[in-house]
Image (cartoon, coloured by chain):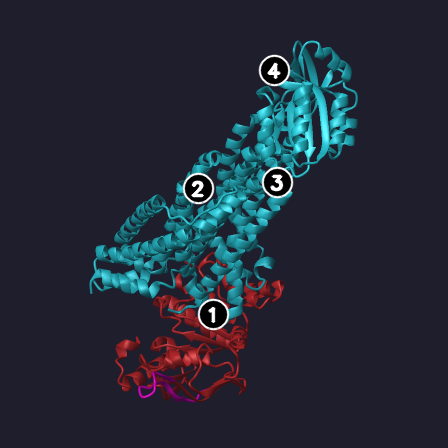
Amino acid sequence: MEIVLETRNLRKEYGTRGMVFAAIDGVDVKVYKGEFLGIMGPSGAGKTTLLNILSTIDRPTSGKVYYGGKDISTMKNRELSIFRRNNIGFLFQDFNLLDNMSVEDNIALPLALSNVNIKEIKERVERLSSFFGLKDQLKKYPYQLSGGQKQRVAAARAIITSPTIVFADEPTGALDSKSSQELLQCLVKMNEELNTTIIMVTHDAFAASYCKRILYLKDGRIHARLDKDSTRKEFFKRIIDFVGSMGGGVSELL
Amino acid sequence: MNSFKLTLMNFRRNIRTYGMYLMAMIFSVATYYNFVSMRYNPQFSEVKDVSNYVYGSSLTTSIVMIWFLIFFIMYSSDFFIKQRKREIGIYAFMGIDNYKIAFIFALEGLLLGIMSLIIGLLLGTLFSKLFLMLLAKAALLNMRIDFFISKEAIVETIIVYLIILFIAFLKGYLSIIRTNLIDLMNTLKKAEELPKVNYLKGLASLIIIGLAYYIAVNYHILGFGRAFMWTVILVIIGTYWLFGSFLSMIIRYLISRKRFLYRGTNIISFSNIAFRIKDNYRTFAAVAVLITTCITSFGTVSSLKYFVAENHKIEVPYTVTYISDRQEEIERVDEIIENSNHKVELRETANFLFVPESEVVVVNLSSFKRILTDLNVKDREKLISKMGQLREEVVYVERPGILMNMLEKKDIKVGDKTYKIKAGVKVPLFGSGVPFPCLVVSDEEYEGLRLKHEEKQFNGIILDRPEDTEDLTYKLAQELPGEAILYTYFIAGATMYDLVGIVYFLGAFLFLVFIFATGSIIYFKILSESFRDKAKYEILKKIGTTDFEIKEAVSKQVGMFFLMPLIVGIVHSIVAISVLSDLLEYSLIIPTMLSIAVFIVVYGLFYIFTRRKYVNIIENQA
């Protein structure tokens, strides 16, 4: 299978000499096309740091990140921004929609910035809004939407450029359980129908159970991996058992 | 640590963020001091004709300055408090009560004000000699200006500023006391909502401005005074509604045009503008009105200078004029002139009738033609052929020195005879030595009138070096009786042109002050918005907007905020000045273009500063 993202011996250190703390301590990951990868781990395990480095927002202290075999550490800031816009989609816990743009403008934003042909932008916005069930919301503004709707708008914005990978950082963190479930089903649909590669950071076992594979991060290292081989419910149970065995309180994960 | 120490610490730390504020304050203090000290300067008060005008303009300009200051301090303190909401919040969290926090912050503002007061006064006294020298030069006053420190002016400046600063202190104090902790934490997070657009008001604004323009252009319908008042009122209302509603309509339309919106950074800037324009419309309208005032008054003042130069030819076509038909007096004058080392370039004599009941003089057509030819008046052939043969009609020559043509009469009575006025013209004829309008009648008609009215003889002489006629004037004045109405180049210069010089100089200076005022008001208003945009630009960066694109988006957004009032202001002032030039019957294109160009340059500098600071604020992570 095609590898879209690969890291080699990734390290990220904070602090000055003598007081160095490694948030990421030698991580090797391979992500294949069409994957739905979950990254779990307790607070302070380095999940978000890892995600930021993978998604090119942050740079590693040492080690390499390859996109389709291409080393991105050599890219300049401007190049990196454009690379990010065209190849990477984002979902954030707090949605990060722009308050003063309508839903349709929010979705169209990355394409508009790249000066894509107007007809093409309109077509894609149309297609994605029906995919995410947002057709009636297009003219509204974010402050008129529910949390679940906002996150679906963010998802539409994330994949409008047909990115190589979509990164999701606790996307269900600010949603109630019903909206969470709807959003996760959307992500699965994205993954299965549009063959979008997704990497999701979460500490919620329920959210993680929608993934196809899970990396468990602890103290900056990959501690374990879990592969989904049965139904979601059984996978959910396995995750709970595993996390419980790691010593983390189960209650924290629910 | 006591609160005074805290204040001092804050003050030292923030001194750089106050750069713009300090500059504006120091400039205003220095300017204010100079305006005031002008009125206490002993050398200026000595010159009798001038001192009244100096006193008046000193008073006016200093009042304008106070008005600006109040505006300026209001906007800037709003900016500073917004900028530091978080800091205030932290103090509040640490359990310092509101009164103490308010005291700390307000005291900081007060210290800042006192500092700029001291620096401003130092610079002001330092530059006062330069300022007065320029003023004297502009006024063509031949006098020495000594270095001079006016205690009265210093005291007055200090008192006025302390009062304003104290009010600002109170205002800042009260506004911090009234804030709740929860508001402090939420101000930046509060979601903005898309403002509603009032289409009726938007359309009405165009109609109102149109009506105002119509009234202004056709000022003769209502009469000048009433037309002026209504125009000002309607323009102000129209401008407020224009920014409040009509521009929102336009921006809303642009946003719905996806072909326009989805082109690069337009989507970022114009979405922001759509949300902001409603919050800011009062400032924009005020700025547009300020710009109009600024350009119009500078245009007026500089046109006055142009106009006076032009008018000079009408008022002083000769170097020496007097009225007399007594041979001995004429010979005496010629003798005096011969003894002075001047060369005679032209000698003109003409008879005219004086009609005191109508306050006019009458001259016949052939004398009129001769004088125009002798004085080499531009376009005289065209004028004379246009006049044609006069029968029962007259041509009305405006009184020399009149600035505006307000002729509304259709006919005029001379003695018991009424004539139709064929045309009104402004040409050099006798100059200000005969300060009456002049009627040109046909030669036959003149002969008839001569029987009923007193005839006088006008004598006009043009000499070389007209500037050097002071001694000559005194000598002639001794010889000639009062009814000869001696008028010379020297007399003309001493009474009128230096005052125009003062008005011109102060006008130009106030223009500068006004540009600074306008610029700093819009600067602080736009920057106080920048904090709300910080989060937005952080999101944009995350999803892959390059730094260059962010700068471009900011440039567009800030640029539009600068441009909109500028365009409206320029259109207003062009209309105002075109009415003025219609009144003066003189084209004011050059002074208008000049004042607009100067304005755009200084305003452009403010744009660059604002944009740079804006980018700094949104890129600064802390």
Chain where mark 1 sits = B
SS at badge 2: helix
Q: How many marks?
A: 4
If you read the primary sequence from the N terminus, does the residue marked by circle 1 or circle 4 appear first?
4
Task: Give yes or no for contact between labels 4 and 3 (Cβ–Cβ under 8 Å).
Answer: no
How many angstroms separate mark 2 from mark 3 (CA)?
A: 28 Å
Q: Position of residue B122 (x, y in %)?
A: 37, 54
Q: Are marks 2 and 1 on the same chain?
A: yes
Q: State the residue at coordinates (46%, 46%).
A: B145
Badge nearest the viewer, 3 or 1: 3
Looking at the colours in the rendered structure, which chain would you say is drawn in red? A
Residue bearing the label numbered 2: B43
SS at badge 1: helix
Residue bearing the label numbered 1: B541
The magenta span reads A13-29
Q: Is residue B167 left or right of residue B62?
A: left
Residue bearing the label numbered 4: B356
Q: Determine the colour of chain B.
A: cyan
Q: Position of residue B483 (x, y in %)?
A: 59, 19
Task: Give yes or no for contact between labels 3 and 1 (Cβ–Cβ under 8 Å).
Answer: no
Q: State the residue at coordinates (68%, 38%).
A: B464
Badge 2: residue crowd in 10 Å (few <14, some 14–19, many ≥20): some
Chain where mark 2 sits = B
Q: State the residue at coordinates (58%, 65%).
A: A121
- Image quarter where the C terminus of chain B lies is bottom left
Q: Amino acid at mark 1?
A: Lys
Q: Are marks 4 and 3 on the same chain?
A: yes
Q: Is residue B67 above or below residue A142?
A: above
